[in-house]
Amino acid sequence: MKVISPMKATYFKVFFLILLVLCITSCRKINPIENTLKNQAFAKNEREETEAFFFISTANISKSIISKSQIAQQKSSDVIVQELSKRIEIQENQLLDQISKLSTSKLIVITEINATHKRDLYNLIDASNNDFNNIYLNAMTEAICDQIELFETISRETNDKQILELVLRFLPEQYKLLRETERIKKRNE
């Protein structure tokens, strides 16, 4: 039996180690063409993220406003508040429908992500009949202001024709509802 000298054994170990490392690293490399296609498919730019945020936020605010308006129609004893809540609900349903259609065409899925409005709903449900109208009108003022702010922000940050048409269609109506809500709120004070 022939014994390998320690120097040759060390060279063989180093050689096999280098060979092993090269094989492992070459197996891990992804085809550059495949990598480029993956990056292009999943790449998002800032404009797309802004638009997606707009759709999701607007849909969540609309859902919240619709829920609050439905509660107001059932719980309010003031006919003027009931009528206002019906008009707000109709307006918000139209907006939500348009947001859903537009986001679907842009392949953006809107789900109930933000459930922060649940506390406001509980406050409305728990409110006494005397305080209900004030709580509802304050909640509507805040929600409509948030929605107007979203509309104004997206109109500055995008040049998408469909989104701008949506904003031009609904923003004046939101201001009108806000003015009417504030007028009724002042009347009730």
Image (spheres, rainbow, N blue to C red):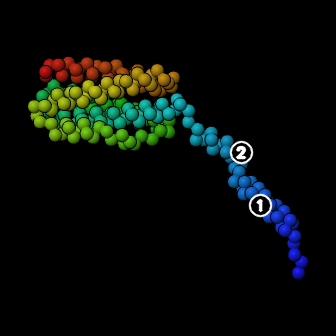
Q: Amino acid at mark 2?
A: Pro
Of the numbered discs 1 and 2, the one sitting upstream in the chain is: 1
Furthest toward the front, the residue is: 6
Q: Whole-Å distance between the Cαs marked 1 and 2?
A: 26 Å
Q: Residue at x 45, y 41 (%)?
A: 109
Q: Quadrant of the N terminus?
A: bottom right
Q: Residue at x 71, y 45 (%)?
A: 32
**Between 100 and 52, the one nearer to me in the picture:** 52
> Horizontal and vertical percent for residue 166?
42, 25
Question: Label 2's element?
Answer: helix
Q: Amino acid at mark 1?
A: Leu
Question: Label 1's element?
Answer: helix
> Horizontal and vertical percent for residue 152?
40, 21
**Between 15 and 124, the one nearer to me in the picture:** 15
> Horizontal and vertical percent for residue 131?
13, 31
Furthest toward the bottom, the residue is: 1
Q: Residue at x 34, y 27 (%)?
A: 146
Q: Establish if 72 lies above or below 165.
A: below
Graded by Cα atoms within 10 Å as few (under 14), some (14 to 19) or many (20 or more), the crowding at tag 2 reads few
Which residue in the protein does label 1 denote? Answer: 17
Q: Quadrant of the C terminus?
A: top left
Q: Residue at x 31, y 24 (%)?
A: 145
- Is residue 117 found left or right of 26 in the rendered image? left
Would you say residue 161 is visible in this rendering?
no
**Between 164 and 117, the one nearer to me in the picture:** 117
Which residue in the protein does label 2 denote? Answer: 32
Would you say residue 55 is visible in this rendering?
yes
Q: Looking at the image, is mark 1 or mark 2 nearer the viewer? A: 1
> Where, by quadrant of the figure, is residue 128 drawn?
top left
Graded by Cα atoms within 10 Å as few (under 14), some (14 to 19) or many (20 or more), the crowding at tag 1 reads few
> Horizontal and vertical percent for residue 59?
37, 35
